[in-house]
Image: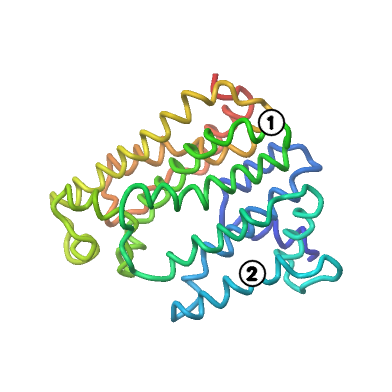
Amino acid sequence: MDAAAHVASLVRGADPDRYLAALYAPADKRRALLALAAFNAEIASVRDRVREPMAGEIRLQWWRDAIAAPADGATGNPVTDELRAAIAAYGLPVAALDAMLSARIFDLYDDPMPDRTTLEGYCGETASALIQLSSLVLDPGAAPRHAELAGHAGCAQAMAGMLRSLPVHRGRGQCFLPRDLLAAAGLTAEEFVAGAPGEAHRRAVDAMTALARDHFAAFLRGAGNLPATLRPAYLPVAPAGRYLDRVERGDPFTELAGISALARQFVMLRRALGGWR
């Protein structure tokens, strides 16, 4: 299996939303989009692959060094090689990738998210940055004009993902809900991840869901002006509203709040063909 096929297979399994979105992009752009998605999937899963946070930091530093290495020659890692090719072909800002790596250090520890501003910054340096980088691949002229929209889209997508993954995060003692939001619900981060969920836990989740919906609504208000060339970069956020519905209606503490593959494909197809007008 060559590097491009390996990367496509990795994304198809690890991040089906971004894989499907890439298929709606022009054929000559898909390889770079999948490289970015694979890079994101790899660094987002570092915690699951290590036993100690320091080992995770070493892995993230390896990615930083590999991206910054001289352009000639291969690294031997197909994701890195595909990512480096995308950087070279589209002039992608390495600083944004470096910021993504720095943000992912938070994932390695059980420290609580300090406040909503920090949470939004984390989402901005991860999910929003990935949307903006993908936009630069698709249409570098139009991408900068929609940076604020990418910010809201990424926050909505990332927060929906955090809420969907509550059982996983609580199981390992990790809390992405910000401390000020938890305090308003009458909880500490330690109380949120320990023991049986009660009414205060539900209030905290509802508040986080409302914050995600605020960003999703802000994205929708501006999405009607999004050019068709940039749609594939934003398609992964299309199912966010459905995911949040599942969080609200179900038991997010014991169930991964997902939707069927058919429902996901339908909502993305609709936006791919008609946009958000």
- Is the C terminus in the top left, top right, bottom left or bottom right quadrant? top right
**Farthest-out residue, right:** 72
User: Which SS class for mark 2?
Assistant: helix
The first of marks 1 and 2 along the sequence is 2
Q: Which residue is mark 2?
A: 63
Is 173 located above or below residue 242 in the figure? below
Decide: is 149 above or below 37: above
Residue at the spot 66% in from the left edge and 35% down from the top edge: 143
Coloring applied to the structure: rainbow
Q: Which mark is residue 174?
A: none
Question: Which residue occupies 57% across, 47% down?
Answer: 129
Question: Residue 240, how many percent across, how many down?
Answer: 44, 39
Q: CA distance from mark 1 to mark 2?
A: 29 Å
Q: Is residue 177 above or below residue 154?
A: below
Characterize the local packing of mark 1: few (<14), some (14-19) or many (20 or more) Cα atoms within 10 angstroms: some
Q: Say how many tags the image has.
A: 2
Q: Residue at x 30, y 68 (%)?
A: 173
Residue 116 pos. (x, y %): 33, 48
Task: Give the camera-side residue of 229 and 273.
Answer: 229
Is residue 54 toward the left or the right of residue 63 in the image?
left
Q: Is residue 30 left or right of residue 271?
A: right
Identify residue for label 1: 142
Q: Position of residue 68 (x, y in %)?
A: 72, 66
Q: What amino acid is at disc 1?
A: Ala
Q: Amino acid at mark 2?
A: Trp
